[in-house]
């Protein structure tokens, strides 16, 4: 199993730097982490993040940062704007958005 150090994700040409202690999981590892830690499934988090808004998912990754499990999500709105969300993977609470 290989972990990728999250150096930042690029969305529409703009980079969003991550903290140095952030590690993101490959999809198979993410599924293991969800089962092991009782985290909320990615598809449930994405559905909740969309709410009623018309938005397309660009990327979503499960990451561990400073001991917390979070989903880092990028979505493209119908207005062409990219929203970057960080969601607590245990509670589903929105931590930050840009």
Image (cartoon, rainbow, N blue to C red):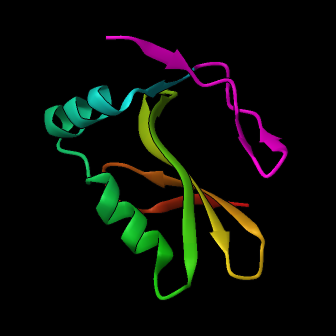
Q: Residue at x 80, y 40 (%)?
A: 15
- In-front residue for pair 63/95: 63
Counting from the top left corner in percent of width and height, residue 64 is at: 45, 30
Q: Is residue 19 above or below residue 54?
A: above
**Residue displayed at 66% across by 67% down:** 76
User: Looking at the picture, does residue 14 appear above or below residue 53?
Assistant: above
Residue 95 falls in image quadrant: bottom right
Locate the N terminus and report the quarter of the image it occupies. top left
The answer to whether residue 4 is magenta is yes
* Left or right: 64 as drawn, with respect to 90: right
Residue range corresponding to the magenta coloring: 1-21
Residue extending farthest top: 1
| Residue 79 belongs to magenta span | no
In x, y percent, where is residue 17? 76, 34
Most distant residue in the right direction: 13
Q: Residue at x 15, y 38 (%)?
A: 35
| Quadrant, the C terminus | bottom right
Q: Nearer the viewer, residue 12 or 8?
A: 12
Depth order, front residue of 76/71: 76
Name the residue furthest bottom: 52
Query: Residue 18 appears at what percent x and percent y?
Result: 68, 32
């Amino acid at each position: 199993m290989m972990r990728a150090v999250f150096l930042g994700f690029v969305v529409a040409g703009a980079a969003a730097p991550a903290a140095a202690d952030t590690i993101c999981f490959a999809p198979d590892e993410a599924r293991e982490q969800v089962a092991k830690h009782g985290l909320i499934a990615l598809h449930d988090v994405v559905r909740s993040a969309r709410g009623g808004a018309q938005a397309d998912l660009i990327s979503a990754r499960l990451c561990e940062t400073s001991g917390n499990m979070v989903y880092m999500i990028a979505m493209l709105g119908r207005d062409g704007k990219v929203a970057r969300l960080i969601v607590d993977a245990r509670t589903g609470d929105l931590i930050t958005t840009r």
